[in-house]
Amino acid sequence: MSLFAAFAYLLSSALFILGLKLLSSPKTARRGNLYGAIGMLIAIVVTLGDKNIIDYTYIIIGLLVGSAIGTILARKVQMTAMPQMVGVLNGFGGGASALVAYAEYGRMGSQTAGNAPDVLVMLGLSLLIGVVTFVGSMVAAAKLHGVMRGAPILYSFQKQSNAAILFAIVALIALFTINPAQWYLLIAIIGLSAILGVTSVIPIGGADMPVVISLMNSYSGLAAAATGFLLSNNVLIISGTLVGTSGIILTNIMCKAMNRSLANVLFAGVGADYEGQTTTTEQRTVIRYTADDAAFMLENAQSVIIVPGYGLAVAQAQHVLQEMASILVGKGVSVRYAIHPVAGRMPGHMNVLLAEANVPYELLLEMDQINDDFQSTDVALVIGANDVVNPAARTKKESPLYGMPILNVDQARTTLVCKRSLNPGFAGEDNDLFYDKKTMMVFGDAKATITGIIQVLKK
Amino acid sequence: MTDALVFSIYVFILATFVGIEVISKVPPLLHTPLMSGSNAISGITLVGSLIAAGEGHGELSVYLGMAAVILATINVVGGFLVTDRMLEMFKQDKSPKPEETRRGN
């Protein structure tokens, strides 16, 4: 690497860090993303000038094909499908790292034996992380997209067999370090890593995908960092590590919000604990209200907090919700949104869905900011959310939800709940909120209900 | 252990601290763009892919390199563009503040 290239890569790294820093505010975030893109462009242009590159044919084909596919994906993807999109992109990043590692082995050619053992270990690790990221992300994306069954796939000795596969891969890497000329060892590492990618994601249920997507995000960064170690390239190590930490931080936030430990996610069984759990069968009655009643309550309130859940996005009701909210604001009602960390299918997903529906971002408040305000609020409007407002999380010690942070909608003067049915949420826990005296249940599709409310409000 | 590896470990550890500092300041509001944007950054493997595809070290390396270039370019281009598309949607409130228009009741 020339001195010029080394400094250019340093500039790229600085731009990546600066770009991520600017993501701390929605006012500067777009500029931050642009800085990141400029950093990337600098790194690419400088690399193209590398004296080792003798043939540009395949590079140009690759860049053109990749840019075309990337542009189409980015333009066409629906905001509801963003988790799959990020999943697929994570996978491609990991796949690229694995391919580079194998190509590097080809480049070593007959001189493999001359390499230091740590270079060979890094080669093995790059393949392992890259392939697991690629295959695991594709499985996660297939689950999220509905191509694959979302329910957890479980079999006996699952954790043990995953651990055995990982152990076998580590053993193969050690063996490869001793016999670097044996290329089939690498093929075995790739094969086992691909199996591990599948077996480590299939036990995780569809509802827990935010954790998996965040974790794969982290892996894709670590894959790039491992390739950086292999090539002794600092810009790869720095950017890969930044992404790796970002993914781990997000994974942690998701785990906390979902009441799970990271170990529980990493070593299988997420979403499995409550498989087959039955809900209480005792007959309790709820009082059904209509859109007319809901409109009356909302119109006569001074303050309303809307709690959106993924059911809102499934019903594609974000736009009508925003229309309803602006009518209420026009009538002098204060309207805000309370966003639970796991509202949606990936970290921050609900914010993107509401921003797309033109909800100003100042009105999107995170749980800690708004939770104390419910007690002084007239109406809490819960749409398509269930577990995140279930009071069992505070009181029922035996519930899988116990200890999970929830939104205090039951503290509002009135709680309006729009839901399709009384069916329990993903956790399989019946929701006492629905039977509360202060709660008004409006059954039906979120979009139809809100449209009904709008019609009444407009009269 | 080679000097190169020791140096790489230095960079790795320091970058971890920078990452924790910077990322923990990103509000949950922007966590989805953070994921897609950081994801685009992890497409930096493209740098390694370009060299593998262009060095002409045997057919296999070249084809693997080209495949890597395609995957990494999708990652980079798709990631930055989709992040920009999302961030463009985050708008400030332009309507008058509720307090100013509140009814008299």
Image (spheres, coloured by chain):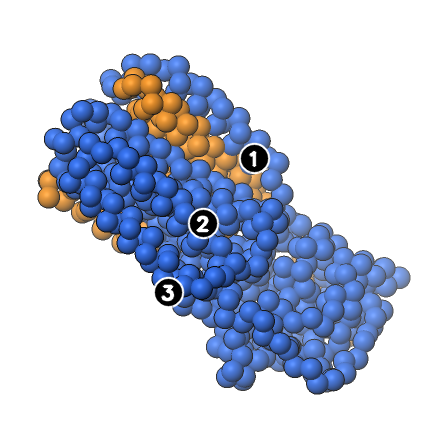
Chain colours: A blue, B orange
* The label number, if any, that marks residue A73 in the structure image: 1
Tell me the crowding category of disc 2: few under 14, some 14 to 19, or many 20 or more residues within 10 angstroms, Cα based. Answer: many
In the rendered structure, which amino acid carries the disc numbered 2?
Val
In the rendered structure, which amino acid carries the disc numbered 3?
Ala
Q: Are marks 3 and 2 in contact (CB under 8 Å)?
A: no
Q: Which residue is mark 3?
A: A263
> How far from the left and from the top, in percent, is residue A144?
57, 50
Chain under callout 2: A
**Residue at coordinates 18% horizontally, 40% vertically from top-left?**
A177
Q: Is residue A347 visible?
A: no
Tell me the crowding category of disc 1: few under 14, some 14 to 19, or many 20 or more residues within 10 angstroms, Cα based. Answer: some
Q: Measured along the vertical axis of the image, is residue A72 above or below residue A408? A: above
Q: Which residue is mark 2?
A: A198
Q: Measured along the vertical axis of the image, is residue A258 above or below residue B73? A: below
> How far from the left and from the top, in percent, is residue A328?
75, 63
Secondary structure of residue under mark 1: helix
In the rendered structure, which amino acid carries the disc numbered 1?
Leu
Secondary structure of residue under mark 3: helix
Nearer to us: label 3 or label 1 = 3
Q: How many marks?
A: 3
Q: CA distance from mark 3 to mark 1?
A: 33 Å
Task: Compare marks 3 and 1 and give the one earlier in the sequence.
Answer: 1
The one of A328 and B100 positioned closer to us in this rendering: A328
Decide if residue A396 is on the left or right side of residue A131. right
* The label number, if any, that marks residue B34 in the structure image: none
Q: Judge if badges 3 and 2 mark residues of a common chain.
A: yes
Q: CA distance from mark 2 to mark 1?
A: 24 Å
